[in-house]
């Protein structure tokens, strides 16, 4: 059997957590001698193009742009079929419900195995719930499904996905090339270099529950007469105005809605602590980023967070919506420098031991080869 040559499809317009995961995977596979191409979509009537595609080109990731006339335009399947055949791709890898549909149709025409990643479902609107229902239906037609957390693996079994087609491979991260703190993020947002900076990152959407951090931050700042603390929330989304309205005027320069921060490494390098307040997660990449930078973390037990954070050892786990417990945990960790180092060091260790990108890419390659063998036998 020849080497796998992978054609990834991801329907996305920005470079967030799942998109970073695809980059980490394709780069790690390239180090194993495996070629990949990442395809994404653009609706031609939109003027803003596709930031994800531009980022792929910037990073040097082999990429392909699928032009659509509208959201439900499936006419590019014929062009894709020709491109995949001409370039010798022999495995289709989908990363969301639209990509699932394209890969299923292409696999039928090309007689290729199809594999899909299942990350997280937010269920934050009827429209999203419908798309997630579609995703489950499409996953049932896949030759292989990768669940990125143990919770997701169990959920997919309950949804009727056959266990013999599934594998659990958690999200992962390359832990080398750690940036040094240069205060560039602090300087951009006028944060004192000696402030204790607590950060979070993610879409400003309901399932991320950033109001929990804002409420806790107000409690901490109310008791911070010396002005030691600052809070920064990285990310964009529909809740920006709502969240901004929760921040008292006296704390507008201490609780900062920073918007989208492109320089991911500088962001984490400038933090002293990371907080995750989500109600729902697949497998939170942000906790791995915090682990790469040896940051103490406080997290809710959302999705795969409990696979990373063991309370008292690799971080602190607190209940959903308990902003009092969050404020107490922040203050406790701040007061104990030895605890900061211990939690950060242990998180860094588990990140390297269990969630390193190269090791998980090797597991994925083994899975792909198993799927290909079964597909050829069938």
Image (cartoon, grey):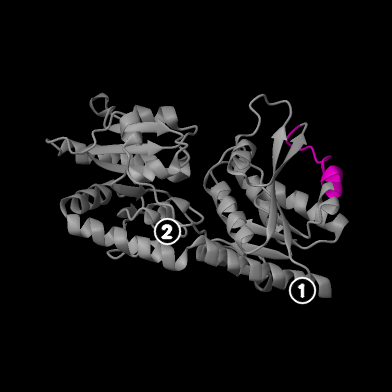
Magenta stretch, residue numbers:
70-82
From the viewer's perspective, is residue 305 above or below residue 64?
Answer: below
Name the disc covering residue 43, or none.
none
Residue 214 rendering spot, x and y as whole percentages:
31, 38
Circle 2 crowding by C-alpha within 10 Å: few under 14, some 14–19, many from 20? many
Observer-nearest of 353 and 46: 353
For the point 82% across and 71% down, which residue is it? Answer: 376
From the viewer's perspective, is residue 273 above or below residue 239?
Answer: below
Observer-nearest of 135 and 274: 274
For the point 28% across and 60% down, which residue is it? Answer: 343
Q: Quick check: is 295 in the magenta stretch? A: no
From the viewer's perspective, is residue 375 above or below residue 254?
Answer: below
Q: Which residue is mark 1?
A: 373
* Lateral position of residue 373 relative to residue 337, left or right: right
- Under circle 2, the secondary element is helix
- Under circle 1, the secondary element is helix
Residue 257 rendering spot, x and y as whole percentages:
37, 32
Circle 1 crowding by C-alpha within 10 Å: few under 14, some 14–19, many from 20? few
* Lateral position of residue 198 relative to residue 68, left or right: left
Choose the circle earlier in sequence order: 2 or 1: 2
For the point 42% across and 27% down, which residue is it? Answer: 241
Q: Which residue is mark 2?
A: 305
For the point 32% across and 39% down, which residue is it? Answer: 182
Q: Which quarter of the rendering shows the C terminus? A: bottom right
């Amino acid at each position: 059997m020849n080497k796998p040559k992978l054609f990834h499809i991801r329907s996305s317009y920005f470079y967030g957590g799942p998109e970073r995961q695809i980059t980490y995977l394709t780069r790690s596979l390239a180090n194993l001698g495996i070629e990949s191409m990442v395809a994404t979509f653009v609706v031609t009537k939109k003027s803003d193009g596709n930031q994800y595609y531009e980022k792929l080109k910037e990073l040097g990731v082999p990429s392909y742009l699928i032009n659509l006339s509208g959201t439900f335009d499936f006419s590019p399947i014929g062009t894709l079929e020709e491109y995949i055949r001409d370039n010798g791709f022999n495995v289709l890898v989908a990363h969301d419900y639209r990509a699932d549909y394209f890969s299923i149709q292409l696999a039928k025409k090309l007689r290729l195995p199809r594999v899909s990643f299942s990350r997280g479902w937010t269920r934050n609107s009827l429209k999203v719930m419908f798309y997630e229902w579609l995703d489950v239906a499409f996953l049932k037609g896949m030759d292989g499904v990768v669940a990125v957390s143990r919770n997701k693996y169990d959920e997919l079994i309950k949804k009727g996905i056959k266990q013999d087609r599934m594998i659990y491979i958690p999200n992962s991260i390359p832990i080398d090339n750690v940036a040094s703190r240069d205060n560039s993020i602090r300087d951009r947002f006028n944060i004192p270099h000696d402030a204790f900076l607590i950060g979070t990152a993610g879409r400003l959407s309901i399932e991320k529950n950033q109001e929990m951090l804002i409420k806790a931050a107000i409690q901490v700042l109310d008791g911070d007469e010396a002005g030691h603390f600052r809070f920064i929330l990285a990310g964009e989304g529909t809740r920006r105005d709502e969240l901004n309205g929760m921040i008292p005027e006296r704390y507008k320069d201490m609780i900062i809605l920073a918007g989208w921060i492109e320089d991911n490494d500088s962001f984490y390098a400038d933090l002293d602590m990371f907080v995750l307040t989500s109600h729902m997660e697949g497998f939170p990449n942000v906790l791995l980023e915090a682990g790469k930078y040896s940051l103490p973390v406080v997290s809710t037990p959302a999705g795969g967070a409990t696979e990373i954070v063991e309370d008292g050892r690799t971080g602190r786990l607190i209940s959903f919506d308990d902003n009092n417990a969050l404020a107490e945990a922040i203050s406790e960790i701040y007061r104990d420098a030895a605890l900061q180092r211990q939690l950060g060091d242990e998180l860094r260790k588990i990140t390297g031991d269990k969630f390193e990108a190269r090791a998980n890419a090797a597991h994925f390659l083994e899975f792909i080869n198993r799927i290909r063998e079964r597909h050829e036998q069938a």
